[in-house]
Amino acid sequence: MNAHRNADALTVADGRNVLTMARDYPQPPSAVWAALTEPAALSQWFPFQVDLDPRPGGTIAFGAPVSEVPLTTGTVTAVAPRRLFAFNWGADHLSWTVTADGEGSRLTLEHTFDDRAGAPSFAAGWDLCMAALGRLLDGGPVEQRRDGGESHDAYVHLFGLDRGTVTAVGDTRTVRFERQLVGAAERVWETLAGGIEPVPGLPVPVGFTDRDVPAGHVTEVRPPHFLSYEWTDGGTVTWDLREGTGYGARLVLTQTGPKSFDTDAALAAWHTRIEDLAARLRGR
């Protein structure tokens, strides 16, 4: 992880998540500002083609390069020439600030959004975009590169999104992990199943289990998205692969148990298991 990425941060303000990222460029603020606000330049390093009216209240439209119809539109919320450019993008808000840094510039992004588990995908994507901006400013080719998952999962750990939670309702304890994965649900399912399709009433394929969690029989299965099984005293383990970001499926793993349930051991066991799955999905 480079020094820039170590300084990136995920915080909460007014109940929403705020991703803050800053990058330094040797060019003056005027050059960075032009690349940020001129559609022809912005469209080269931004995730979509962009058309905009750079005034507060103006419309900003995002579309695919080959389409004349915008995929989404937003509204410019603030403009301070050569310093601040902010706009809504769907339910999200992006604020870009340009400041002088010696003979060069610093560009700071504040991305405000609701989907906390999606933060690593957003951060990894912006990391690539801001690197592409650097290549554009240097006058070089601005090909869009892809993240194989290493940057994404580095942000998972940096933001502490690899940790599970414990809740208690009456005499029931629940351990829960929510993790954005790098891989579609079909690929995740194949990796977990290992060629053995789960069947209700039969033992659970080992990929869905952990050696520290005694596994019973499959109770419900809907490939490639959902599997649940018994583990002890009426407790259950559930693997739920939901729609996630563009990186792949969103895993929600839960384990429920009685009041005596050793939740600390479960947190440690499933953390290790999910890290192993993530590494396999990255191809390691």
Image (cartoon, rainbow, N blue to C red):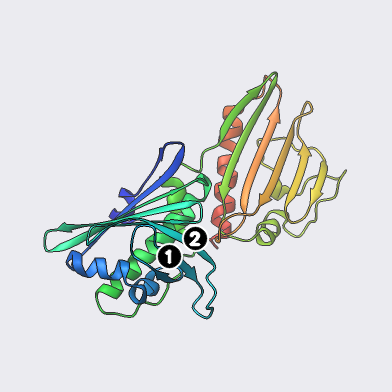
Say which quadrant the N terminus sits in: bottom left
Identify residue for label 1. 60
Circles 1 and 2: CB atoms closer than 8 Å: no
Q: What residue is rendered at 30% in x and 73% in y?
A: 135
Q: What residue is rendered at 59% in x and 29% in y?
A: 166
Q: Looking at the image, how many numbered discs can be counted on the residues? A: 2
- Of residues 139 and 71, the one drawn nearer to the viewer in this rendering: 71
Horizontal and vertical percent for residue 152? Answer: 46, 56
Horizontal and vertical percent for residue 52? Answer: 39, 68
Q: Secondary structure at mark 2?
A: loop
Q: What residue is rendered at 74% in x and 49% in y?
A: 226
Of the residues shown, which amino acid type is indicated by label 2? Gly
- Of residues 279 and 4, the one drawn nearer to the viewer in this rendering: 4
Work out whether mark 1 precedes mark 2 in sequence or the reverse, and give the earlier one: 1
Of the residues shown, which amino acid type is indicated by label 1? Ile
Horizontal and vertical percent for residue 281? Answer: 58, 59
Identify residue for label 2. 149
Judge depth for marks 1 and 2 and give the one in front.
1
Q: Is residue 159 visible?
A: no
Residue 138 image-quadrant placement: bottom left
Residue 181 image-quadrant placement: bottom right
Image height of 50 relative to 119, above or below: below
Q: Residue furthest toward the front?
A: 57
Q: CA distance from mark 1 to mark 2?
A: 30 Å
Q: Residues within 10 Å of mark 1 (few under 14, many from 20)?
A: many
Q: Residues within 10 Å of mark 2 (few under 14, many from 20)?
A: many
Q: Is residue 140 visible?
A: yes
